[in-house]
Image (cartoon, rainbow, N blue to C red):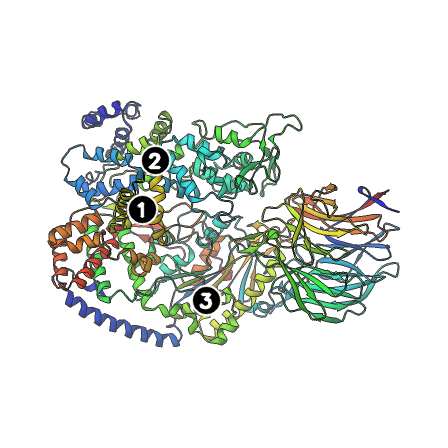
Amino acid sequence: MTCRNSYLLSSYMFIIVIVFNLSPCQATEPNIPLHIQIDNLVSKRQSALKISPAKISSHEEFVRRVYLDLNGVIPTAKQARLFLDNKSPDKRQKLIDELFANPEYALSMARVFDVMLTERRIAGGGNLYDVPPTVWKSYLASSFANNKPWDQMVREILGTDGSEKNILGASKFYNVRDVSPHLLTRDIGRLFLGCDLQCAQCHDDPHVKDYRQADYYGIYAFVQRLKIHPLSPKGSLVAEGASGKTTFTSVFTAKSGETFPLLPGRNMIPDPTIEKDKEYKIKPGPKEAGIPTYSRRFKLAELLPQPATKGFSRNIANRLWALMMEKGIVHPLDLHHDGNPPSYPELLDTLEKWMVDHNYDIKEFLREIALSKTYQRSSVTFENQKEIPAGTYCVAPIRGLTAEQLRWSVLQATGRIEQYYLKIESQKKSSGESSNLPYWNTKLIQNEVLEKQTASFITAFAGLPGQPEMGFNPIVDQALYLRNNSKFLQLLKDEPGLVLSRLSETQDVNLLSEELYLSLLSRRPNKDEIEDVIKMLANAKVPAIRLETLQALMWGLLLSAEFRLNH
Amino acid sequence: MGSTMNLTSSRIEFSRRTLFAGAAGSLAASSISNEVFAKPVKPKKKQLLLLFLSGGASQFETWDPKPGTKTGGPFRAISTSIPGVKISELLPQTSKIMHRLTVVRSVNSNIPDHFLGHYALQSGRSVPGYPVLGSAVAKLLEQPDDLLPGYISIRRDGPKAYTDVGDAAFLGAKYEGVRIVNNQSPENLIAPLSVKPEITNLVDRVRMATDQRFKMGRNSNPIASYGTTYNQADALMKRREIFDISKESQSDHERYGKHDFGQNCLLAKRLLQSGVTCVKVTHFDWDAHQDNFYWHQIRCAEFDRTLVTLLDDLSEKGMLENTLVVITGEMGRTPQINNLGGRDHWGRAWSMVMAGCGVKPGIVYGSTNELGTEVKENPVKLGDLFHTYLRALGIDSSLDYNIDGQTNPIADPAAKPIDLLLA
Amino acid sequence: MKINPLKSKVTTEHKHDAPLLCCAYDMGGKFLFAGGRDNGVVVIDLKSGKKTILKGHDSWVCAISRIGPDVVLTSDSNGKIIAWDCGAEVPSQKWIIQAHPSSIQALSVSFNGDYLATGDRQGEVKIWQASNGKLAHQLAQLEYLISGLAWHPDGKQIITADRKPQKPRIKIWDISTLKETLSIDVPELSGYRRVEDIEWGGIRFLIVSPDGNQIIACGRNGYDGPACALLFDSSTGKLQRKFVSGLKGFCYYALFHPEGFLMTASGDVGKGEFQTWSITKDESVAVVSTSGPCSSIAIHPDGKQFAVTQSVGKNSYPDSGLIVFHQWEEK
């Protein structure tokens, strides 16, 4: 920690030095902080291509972007004002650190990884054999609250059978896929290694020469013996048999193969010889999932999350980069292969190496990206946007809010989050109750009420089950939702403690406009905008009409592209 | 309505006035549209109807029967209105109108997968990122005065796993298929009564003024395509009666069939008649890994009668000559019958059918070998079919899209149209 | 003379070039009839071992049952039933009826041999006179595929199984009134999947015990198995026992031996088994594994031999069939 602080203080100096003495070897020097390595690489490419980057983002752009990325929600008017009025030169870094320290960091990351790892799938048996969403989310949130390294998370997710109390919920990855070996094989490849081996199930992929049938069945062999054990007294568990060969035949060449478990870039793992009748530590039965003496799945959990497994480190580096920068350096995120090279190979190499050197520290990695100038670029540029080549990062991308970010941001903009938590606070004071759960955990449970209020958002804005989240792709159904849906309009109603009621109590139009714009767009209104508000309110003297007009103002801003896009 | 107003000079009274004018205008517009509705669509506009047999229909139990062989299954082949051509006995009605269909029996897509097959079928490519057929045709046949969405996809609710993997890709949201689920009008088509029109008007003014400022110096594509969705929403709200199949006659309901597919096809006809460029109807549950023959009896029974009704109706209304009807799944099913009496995913040799605009009726193109395991003559790729659809609709498939300075071939340059199929 | 139901041995095998689904002996024990995924009816002359293929069906032969002294019925996927006269050296057609417009999934003969009942894909159940193939009764249409039919030994009731999604049903009908007297939901045998909105499981076969007190429904427990047969009390509809196979696939067939024990046939990908049960015990008393999925069993009228039909082929694609004859050890 101390080390990091010292280099930050002198970060400007560093940049000057580095820019002028740039060489590839220095750029990947391990003791140079990652955010500076990123900026150096990016500016090297920009100057090579003679493109000048956009300015650093305004504080207004920055505060909205960083809240959305790190806490999954826009700031309140109060939070935005506090940041904008802060005169301290290191206020961005301080805000970044604050946002990482908030319980919202863990909760928001849990939402992101829930969508990434389940892809909004619905288990075949509905909720019957699946891990309940809260249990899974609290596993994720607790992992992020404790900044569990990624390799450890993957080890837990792939290693658990669903019975370990301390990581309850981690088996969701298996359960939501009905513990179906082919589905698991595909998604282990896609989500943990960045390779969609699907076509290689039946034959070597004709379109992607890197993907071979043997790779597919190498992973398949790890999970082939798994099945769901629904009748166990502990609920449904992931059960593993002690035997089963993995053979495959190409539908093209009719050539057959047999394989033992195999991870890309590594050696085949033959099964040990086990004496007859000693195949199980615990024999499976109708009421017992059973534990084999030798578990291929434990091997998978042990060996996959290691730097030696091709794609493991690169995948997570690329995915976290995409989380902050809209797209992966390899994009789509699950198509790492020769035909789809990274837009900036050196940059991805650097990120991957950092991940390995820093034991897959997710929080620190995101923090480094957030600190970089590359992340902090403005989305405003007067360059011709169409001529900017990919991977130059000379202007911030305009990204759509995810369904989850949108839901929480609408709740925030209307003041419903504050209102709800103030109510809880006052109830707690009067009852004197206190909980010994960690703060994130209390919030996770309390947030459910707000989530229920906004469930229709997810239906309207979420992508397809089993599909990765796509970029910003607005559709007319969503516009209709935001115009006419009664559940959405319910959120805009006037209630004590909400932004609308605060606005209606404010008589000074300047103050009112400022509160309005800070609440919804995290910035102060400009002169024209204040003028507009004045004009609109000029004839709305009757209180009921004034309230309606204010409501329309809020609604209009909620429907604006500026609200819908992270920029 | 509000789009022509200048925000800074407008006042509340003014907006009210325009609003009333606008309301009257929209009333007038809807009565005109009703009138237009009674007549056929304006001539010459070409349209597309995709009947998508989701999950992959078996070619053996439909268009390419192999009775009495090891792979043929239990059903017989029956004669059709094309001399010498037989199809499965599960399609008795269709057999009588075969002379109006264009059958391809030699599709080799080589993609035994729902997602990839569905995408490749609809985009004519295996590389991701291209617009699907409905979106592409909506864009390519767009006319300046089109108000309705160019592409509407009619489907069932429930897990979305097997359907609509594609989207408008780089064409933008305007060409994204509007989904109609369970024959319900798209949700949220009616403004709640509690919202006064002047409020809606104000909301639009604020939104558009904010977007105008936000666009300055920024990449305008996402901002513009977001704005477009609101215009589309307006257009849909004004003409929502086009989704209302209760306005269709009782006898049409009867003859199309009361099941989902019948009702969906009736709605598809209504939408095409209203001027929507592309409609896709998804007929579900062809993925018969188990009990293939049982399921194909059920699926085909629905499909057979409704297809014939639909084609008759389009033809009677003079619409068929301007509407290309494409009937296909995302793949075929294995010649081998599995231990559960099912047929599995298969992309190497299967069939699809077209009718109507731009295609030569009454022909059977390509063939498979005796057991249906390989294409014997005239192999066809999905990319070739994609070119063929566009050509049938009068679109030069060798052209490029030019969107924001980026050019992209509208159809895979490695494939080509099948001239023998084109009228 | 009694047999030992726990011990049997294979006597002979007959190969066929299509997977086999059903079989039956004629009353006189002269022939074994078998049918499956082709249009021929396989007849084995038990004395000479000679195999004959009978023609007449133009679709798959999905069910076979003996009826009366010298007659065997075969039904197909096109709704046709043929009655074969077994009096002569080679069976010959006695009558043919086009019983249903769609495939016949279930066929059952009354205990006295006077009637047969058939059920089809559309949920129609028809009762015919055995002597001439004339329609005698018809039940109200059940909407769902009729996947099993069984006569009560009293001859006055008939039991149907249908494939209602999520809740396959067993229904008991009084033939004199054609009214339903009991309906049992069997969700245990549902393999319903929301993804496709299809019932992939269902009751695959249905029988009644010789005393009429129990009903046995065959199928698979849930979407993923195991194969199993369920025992219900026919007066209360209560589930009394589950006979669970070691296989994941389906239990396709069950029948009672005249000495009272129960046999079941099950199949999975590339393997099968037939099991022997006492209806008072959860665990089977004998199990024989086979190289291919077992689809049906027939017990010779002498009670000492039986035949099992199987599918044979690579992985999940059977392309031929096998009839295996077994003999029980005598006690």
Mark toward the start of the polypeptide (1 vs 2): 1
Question: Where, by quadrant of the figure, is residue C88 drawn?
Answer: bottom right
Helix, strand or loop at label 3? It is loop
Can you tell which of label 1 and label 3 is closer to the viewer?
Answer: 1
Q: Tag 1: residue type? A: Gln
Rendered residue at 43%/53% (across/down): B123
Residue beneath disc 1: A405
Query: In the image, are marks 1 and 3 on the same chain?
Result: no
Chain assignment, label 3: B
Question: In the figure, is residue C134 to the left or right of B178?
Answer: right
Query: In the image, are marks 3 and 2 on the same chain?
Result: no
User: Residue A438 shows which numbered tag?
Assistant: 2
Question: In the figure, is residue A325 to the left or right of C321?
Answer: left
| Residue C72 location (% of width, % of height) | 80, 60
Disc 3/disc 2 C-alpha distance (Å): 66 Å
Question: Where, by quadrant of the figure, is residue B377 drawn?
Answer: bottom right
Residue beneath disc 3: B357
